[in-house]
């Protein structure tokens, strides 16, 4: 780097830093209150969080999920019946068979 590039970059950084000092100092000098801290984040199973009213979910994923591995580990990943594919997915599905 040339000396003028380094000096120009340093000058720009100093100017940006100096510009921020008066606004912070003047706000403190005027005695303005700092913004209040947000309330602490509740955990997912906190009673107050569980008691909050919420809209009904669009579908239900609760319950017991079971993957039958009796025929082998790889059988659960994909298998018939396949959905009806459209467009490029249909072409890729035909090529894969």
Image (cartoon, rainbow, N blue to C red):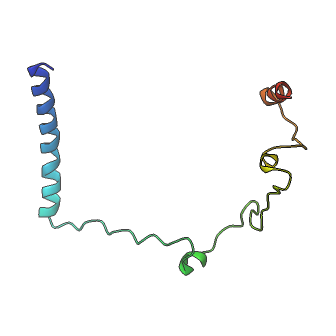
Please identify the quadrant where the N terminus is shown.
top left
Query: Which of 92/86 is in front?
Result: 92
Residue 52 placement, left or right of 55:
left
| Picture residue at 16% right of the left edge, 36% below the top | 13
Residue 75, horizontal then vertical, whole percent:
82, 47
| Picture residue at 54% right of the left edge, 77% below the top | 46
| Picture residue at 89% right of the left edge, 43% below the top | 80
Residue 53 placement, left or right of 96:
left
Determine whether 26 is above or below 9 in the image: below
Q: Quadrant of residue 35?
A: bottom left
Q: Quadrant of residue 32?
A: bottom left
Please identify the quadrant where the C terminus is shown.
top right
Residue 17, horizontal then vertical, whole percent:
15, 43
Determine whether 56 is above or below 7 in the image: below
| Picture residue at 78% right of the left edge, 26% below the top | 88
Name the residue at the right extreme: 81
Determine whether 78 is above or below 42 in the image: above
Query: Which of 47/77 is in front?
Result: 77
Q: Quadrant of residue 2?
A: top left
Residue 58, horizontal then vertical, whole percent:
74, 60
Residue 43 placement, left or right of 72:
left
């Amino acid at each position: 780097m040339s000396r003028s590039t380094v000096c120009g970059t340093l000058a720009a950084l100093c100017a940006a830093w100096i510009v921020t000092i008066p606004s912070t100092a003047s706000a403190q000098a005027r005695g303005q209150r700092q913004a209040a801290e947000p309330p602490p984040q509740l955990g997912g199973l906190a009673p107050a969080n569980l008691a909050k009213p919420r809209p009904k979910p669009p579908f239900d994923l609760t319950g017991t999920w079971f993957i039958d591995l009796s025929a082998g580990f790889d059988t659960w990943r994909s298998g018939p019946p396949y959905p009806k594919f459209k467009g490029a997915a249909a072409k890729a599905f035909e090529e894969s068979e």
